[in-house]
Amino acid sequence: MTEFGSGGEDRDDSSKLISFSEARRARLNVPVTFHRRELDKILRLYGQMVAAGEWRDYAIDHLKDRAVFSVFRRTSEVPLFQIVKDPKLARKQGAYSVVAASGAILKRGHDLDRVLTVFDRKLRLAGT
């Protein structure tokens, strides 16, 4: 009779645990997408920034490992900001982040509303 874990093997399978949605997405080869509520929040912010004359265009990329909402001042330029959803980071730093054109991460977290508050400061400064 064989015992579980016998044979001198040190097995640490906990580092290989992934969520059900990640496993399903990997099995089906489905890209990461923004859900409707997430997209509503992002587009509401986008509308405010367009009205303020800050942003003029956007692009949405649904990649294998993350979803990216990029905002532009002009279409031909590099993105001013990217709002990124990376499910692999959901249990660590948070799935959502805002990345500047320089590549610097301005804010990261588990809650999209709190991550998007990084743009509130800019709106307040522009109004003064």
Image (tube, rainbow, N blue to C red):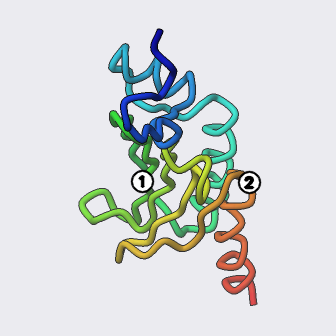
Badge nearest the viewer, 2 or 1 = 2
Residue 83 visible in the snapshot? yes
Name the side, left or right, on which 23 lies relative to 119: left
Q: Earlier in the sequence, mark 2 or mark 1?
A: 1
List x then y, in percent, for residue 21: 54, 23
The residue that mark 2 highlights is 113
Front-lying residue, 43 or 32: 32
Mark 1 residue crowding within 10 angstroms, few (<14) / some (14–19) / many (20+): many
Residue placed at 63% from the left, 67% from the top? 52
Considering every residue shown, the one lying at the far bottom of the view is 128
Front-lying residue, 80 or 95: 95
Quadrant in the picture for the C terminus:
bottom right
**Label 1 secondary element:** strand
Considering every residue shown, the one lying at the far front of the view is 1
What residue type is disc 1 on?
Answer: Ser
Residue placed at 65% from the left, 78% from the top? 122
What residue type is disc 2 on?
Answer: Asp
Front-lying residue, 82 or 26: 26
List x then y, in percent, for residue 110: 68, 52
Q: CA distance from mark 2 to mark 1?
A: 17 Å
The residue that mark 1 highlights is 70
Mark 2 residue crowding within 10 angstroms, few (<14) / some (14–19) / many (20+): few
Name the side, left or right, on which 113 lies relative to 97: right
Residue placed at 51% from the left, 46% from the top? 85
